[in-house]
Image (cartoon, helix red, strand yellow):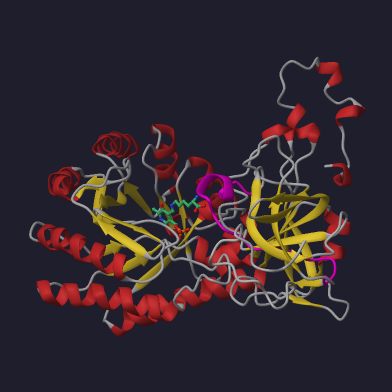
Amino acid sequence: MHSAPTALAPEWLAVPDDPDDLAEGVWPASAHRDAEGALVLGGAPVADLVRSYGTPLLVIDEGEVRRRAAALRDAFEAAASAHGTTARVYYAGKAFLSTVVARWMVEEGLNVDVCTGGELQVALAASVEPSRIGFHGNNKSVTELESAVEVGVGTIIIDSAIEIERLAAITARAGARVRVMLRVNSGVHAETHDFLATAHEDQKFGLPLADAEAVVARIREIPGLEFVGLHCHIGSQIFGVAGFRESASRVLDLHAVLLEDGPVPELNLGGGFGIAYTRVDDPAPVGELAEGIVTAVAEGCAARGIDVPALSFEPGRAIIGNAGVTLYEIGTIKDVVLENGARRYLSVDGGMSDNARTALYGAQYSARLASRAGDGEPVLSRVVGKHCESGDIVVDHEYLPADAAPGDLLAVPATGAYCAPLSSNYNHVPRPPIVSVLDGAARLIVRGETVADLLSRDAGIPESDSGADPTQTSEGER
Ligand code: LLP
């Protein structure tokens, strides 16, 4: 194998001078190598973490999560205050939710956005004050809506006309009144560096702007519903403010019309702020982002002669994504030599079951040797999992040191968002444990599954066998 650029490497991936370096912004700020070259996360040496919890292991840097949450809250509050309004930040729990993380959010002054009854239960189990919860979903069941009304969820984001009638009946039965927003579809779809504006978006969320006036009129007729404003979310992993600006402008046209018939005190512009998965991603600093978006809203309001509403935002990935690092053990290595170059396949002990994003979205990640620094030239490598599927790729393209070997630990950064939540038991692989690290101490925040957990759902096993020893695995055997 050789380190010369190969035709198999994508153009964006440069051959690194040092295949052990940790790209700033991709890794948690606490990540560094100790004197021996081993990776340390949140003050905890990865070898210690793996000794206690095994591999694969998802490590969440608590300090990084808290810092990013606080930075977003501060940035939006400051930008809003400069324009004479307020801003609230909701953490989008779909990116990664556990009771511990929900508590961190509350402690950092954030609210929590949930999109199913299950996520709602996690937030409630974490004692998140119901009034701080926003409840989303394009198909909330009657049972989910009933429990949201019963516990007094702060805002329900209505996603369809049918939901209005469901909520009318539920609030009438309960004698309750709930704050609601209406999710609209601004026709702006933003993906990474570009955005696309169309007349009608072909997707399931929200209502077209053109239908919203009549729908809001219906909401306002219902005594149990307090209409507080419009909600719009234009996509995820978005860089720049252009898409938000265009979307805000379209939504403000409707907002201004709705003001003619009653109060519209709030506006929620969703989440979607992009993060760095590899060194070529360059997200804007949160201060710039907040200032750009809030200024666009304020200018839009001034142009229409209306007050700036109270604003809210729902970032998920930008808070938790870069705080997560997945640790794997390298099992097998193969060199594949093709006509136009060579590629090394490093197989790890997890894969698409703990990170489906590469297979699902063609997402790009990076990787580094973790148990030690490497000692060899950079080799174009592909990190693959242990699943019975050729698309089971964790890191599509990365240069790793030539001496990477079976038994080495490999770390994949930026796995804090949408990896654990999208995980599966494909091939009956148990889901890995999740630990948080802070100041050198590790804390289990979600225990790993065992094969026994998986077998416990198999209704074909005779009762007397279900607790039998062969189904029990120790942490190390996961
Ligand atoms: N608010 C709403 C209404 C959303 O639908 C979403 C994401 C968010 C906020 C948070 O977006 P964020 O700030 O995390 O980008 N599984 C995909 C992402 C799906 C995002 C769904 N909605 C992925 O792994 O890239």
Tell me which segment is drawn in magenta.
Answer: 355-374
Residue farthest toward the right in the current orientation of the protein:
469
**434 inside magenta stretch:** no
382, 140: nearer the viewer: 382
The part of the image, by quadrant, that contains residue 267 is bottom left
362, 121: nearer the viewer: 362
Give the percent coordinates (x, y) of residue 112.
48, 58
**370 inside magenta stretch:** yes
Residue farthest toward the left in the current orientation of the protein:
260
At 32% from the left edge and 77% from the top edge, which residue is drawn?
Answer: 292
Vertical order, 444 against 390 (above or below): below
The part of the image, by quadrant, that contains residue 372 is bottom right
Which corner quadrant holds the N terminus? bottom right
Give the percent coordinates (x, y) of residue 294.
30, 75
Magenta stretch: helix, strand or loop mostly: loop
Confirm whether residue 252 shows in the render.
Answer: yes
Vertical order, 397 against 283 (above or below): above
At 22% from the left edge and 73% from the top edge, which residue is drawn?
Answer: 308
Vertical order, 121 against 5 (above or below): above
Vertical order, 461 against 104 (above or below): above
Which corner quadrant holds the C terminus? top right
Image check: 222 left or right of 462?
A: left
Displayed-image quarter of ligand 1? bottom left
